Amino acid sequence: MQREFFLPARPWNREPQTPERWLELATEGLEAGAAEQVRAESLAQLAGAQQAGQSQAEVLGGWGDPNAANARLRRSHLQGGEAARIPAGYARGWPGLRAAYCEHLFFTVMSSLLVLLAFWMTLLREPAPRALWLGVIYVLILLLPLLRWYALSGPAQPPVTRVWRSWLTKPETWLALLMVGRALWQLAFPDAGGPSVQWWHLIFVIYVLSELWLGLKAARKVQAQSGEQVQSGVPHG
C-alpha cells in the first residue's frame, strides 16, 4: 500500500497526496503527449530515489507544490490545443495539393466569387486600371493554396519555420495585409477617396497577429524540448 502525506506548505489542504494525484495536478492542462512524458520521467525519478533509500514522502516533498510545478510546466510544455497550431505540412503530389485547396475551401470560393463580381462591376463602371487590380487579387486568391502547398511540402522543416510559412500563406493573413495596406494608403493620400477603415479591421488584424504569436510560442516550446537532453524528474524553475 502506497504511503500518503499532506503538503506541509498548505496546512489547510488536508487532501492526501500520492504520486498519481500530484502528477494529476502538475500536468493539468498539458497536451496529452507532454503530460505523459512528464509522468513517465517523474515516476522514473521516484523509482530511482526509492531504490536509493529515499521514502515516497521525501521525494514528493522535494517536488514541492504541484500547482507551482504546473505553472512551470505550462511555460515549457505544450498545453492542450497548442500542438494544433503547428502545421504538419502536406505530402508531395496531388493528394497534398488537394488537401491544401480543401483546407480553406469555403474562404477561397466565397472570396473568389466576391472579387470576381467586383471585378466585372468595376470593369463596367470605372477605368480599366482599377479593375486590373481586382483581377490580380482574384488570381492571387486562386494561387494562394498552391503557394501554401509548395511552402509546406517536401522535406521536414523546423516547427518555427512551418508556423511562419503557414501564417504567410493563409488567406486571413493576406486579407489582413490588404487592410493594413489600405489604411496606410489613406494615411498617405487622405483625398484619394474609397471606403474608410473600420474598427473591425483593426480587430481582425490583431486576431491574425495573435495567431502568429501563439503558433510561434508553441513551436519554440517544441524546438526547445527537442534540443534538450531528456532529464528525469519534474523541471524546477
Image (tube, grey):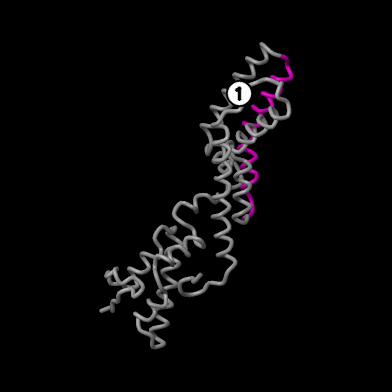
Q: Which residue is mark 1?
A: 115
Q: Residue at x 39, y 79 (%)?
A: 59
**Residue 140 included in the magenta stretch of the image:** yes
Q: Residue furthest bottom?
A: 53
Q: Is residue 169 left or right of residue 50?
A: right
Label 1: how many residues lie within 10 Å, few (<14), some (14-19) or many (20+)?
some
Type of secondary structure dominating the magenta stretch: helix
| Displayed quadrant of residue 209 | top right
> What is the tally of numbered marks visible in this picture?
1
> Residue 12 location in percent, x, y?
29, 69
Is residue 37 shown left or right of residue 8?
A: right
Tell which residue pokes out farthest to the left in this image: 1
Residue drawn at x 30%, y 74% as measured from the top left: 6
For the magenta stretch, what is the residue range?
127-156
For the view shown, which residue lies furthest in the top direction? 125
State which quarter of the image contains the N terminus. Answer: bottom left
Camera-nearest residue between 177 and 100: 177
Q: Locate residue 197, reporting x and y percent.
A: 61, 28
Along the viewing direction, whichever of 218 and 94 lies nearer the viewer? 218
Q: Is residue 6 magenta?
A: no
State the image coordinates of residue 96 (x, y, percent, origin top left): 57, 43
Q: Label 1 sits on what residue type?
A: Val
Horizontal side of residue 222 vs 181, given as left or right: left
Is residue 226 placed above or below 104 in the rendered structure?
Answer: below
Q: Give coordinates of residue 30: x percent, y percent.
A: 43, 59
Q: Is residue 23 above or below residue 102?
A: below
Q: Residue at x 62, y 24 (%)?
A: 196
Residue occupying image coordinates x 52% and y 62%: 76
Which is nearer the eye, 59 or 123?
59
Secondary structure of the residue carrying tag 1 is: helix
